[in-house]
Image: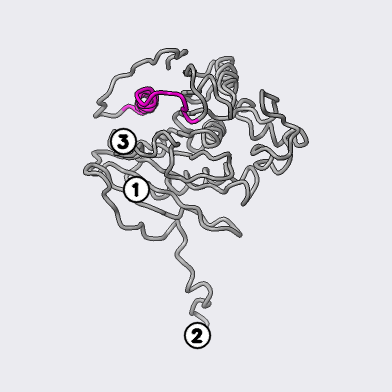
Amino acid sequence: MNGTEPAPRNSIAAPHPDEAALPPQAFPEPDVRLLRAVPYAEPEGTRPPELDLWLPRRPDEPLPLVLFVHGGGWQRGRRDDMGVRTRDWSPTPFARIAAAGFAVACVDYRLSGEAVFPAQLDDLRSALRWLGLRSGELGIDTARTVAWGESAGGHLAALLTLTHADPPLTGAVVWYGPSDLGAARPGYSPHDPNTPEARLLGSAPASAPARARAASPVAHTHASAPPFLLVHGEQDTVVACSHSTDLAASLESTGARVELWTVPETDHVWRGASDSLVENIFEHSLRFAERLVPRTDSRTTAHRPPGSTAEP
C-alpha cells in the first residue's frame, strides 16, 4: 500500500458536513425550494444530526433565517413538525415562512434518550455554525436569525437566544415553552425523577440545582436580550402558562423587549383554539419575526393581537 494513500476507513467515510455537497433541491411549492436531510455536524458516538432548509425560489438578497426547533418533551419529535394543529396545512407552515422571504432551518437535536443537557443546546449551536460556514452558497444571513420553537423546542429556542453570542440572535418566537425547570408548578414536581425535565438533565432537577438553573431560560435573562414573543394557552395542562408569564416578567425587569400573548381557554399545542385563532397565532408570529429583520422588499405591517402586552 502506498504511504500517501488514505487509510481505507477514512477513504470510505462520508465527507464531513463542512465540505459535503448539498443535496438536490426539491420544489414542494411553486415559490419554495427545499434541501432535505442535510447533515450539519458529526458529534462523537452518535448519528450525524440533520436539518431541512426551506428557501424562497428566487431570493433577491441574502435571506434572514428562522431556526425552527421542534417539541416533544426533549424525548421525541420530528424536525419538520410545528405541532398537531399545523400538520395538515397546505402549504406547510415552513413553506409559508419561506414564501414570506426567510430561509427556514428545521433542525434535529439529540433527544434525552441519546444525551443529556447541554447536548441539545450544543447541537443548535453547531447548526448555527454550519449555516454560517455555508451561508455564501446557501444565500442566507445568519446575523439576522430568529429562533422559533414550540414546547420543548420553545425552551431550547429561548435558551439559545439568551445565551448565543457569535453572532447574537435577532429574536425569538416561543410557543408554550418551559422556562424554569427547578420550580414546582401544578402537576409538576422538581423532585420527581421520572419527568421529561429529569430525563433531559439526567436526574431530578431538585437533585441537580446548578444544572437545572443552567437549563432554565428565566435564569439567563439580561438587558441586551433580543426581543421575545411568548405565546401560551392559559389552560395549558402540560406546560403551565406561568412559565411564559414568569419569563416575560424576568425579561421586562431587565429592560429587554418582550411581547406576551396568553390565549384564553386554550391548552397545550393550541388544543381548544379555533382553526382561525391558530392561523392568527401563526401569522402574528411570522409578522413579529419580519419586524425584527427589516428588508428592502418589506411587504407587511405589524399588528397586535388581543391580549398581548409590551409590543416590540
Residue for badge 1 = 136
Q: Which residues are magenta?
A: 269-294
Identify the residue under disc 3.
Answer: 96
Image location of residue 303, percent across then percent down: 34, 16
Q: Is residue 258 left or right of residue 113?
A: left
Q: Amino acid at mark 2?
A: Asn
Residue under the image location 29 percent in, 54 percent down: 25
- Whichever of labels 2 and 1 marks the residue nearer the N terminus, that label is 2
Contact? badges 2 and 1 (CB < 8 Å)? no
Main SS, magenta region, reads: helix
Frontmost residue, 3 versus 213: 213
Q: Amino acid at mark 1?
A: Gly
Front residue of 54/162: it is 54
Tell me the SS state at disc 2: loop
Q: CA distance from mark 3 to mark 1?
A: 23 Å
Q: Residues within 10 Å of mark 2 (few under 14, many from 20)?
A: few
Pointer 3 or 2: first along the chain: 2
Disc 3 to disc 1: CB gap under 8 Å:
no
Q: Tell me: residue 241, above or below residue 309.
A: below
Tag 3 secondary structure: helix
Occupied quadrant, residue 30: top left
Residue 268 colored in magenta in the image: no
Tell which circle, 3 or 1, labels the residue nearer the N-terminal end. 3
Q: Is residue 133 above or below residue 308?
A: below
How many discs appear?
A: 3
Q: Which residue is mark 2?
A: 2
Asked whether the viewer can see residue 260, the reply is: no
Q: Nearer the viewer, mark 3 or mark 2?
A: 3
Tell me the amino acid under the disc marked 3: Arg
Q: Quadrant of the C terminus?
A: top left
Residue 48 in percent (x, y) is at 51, 57
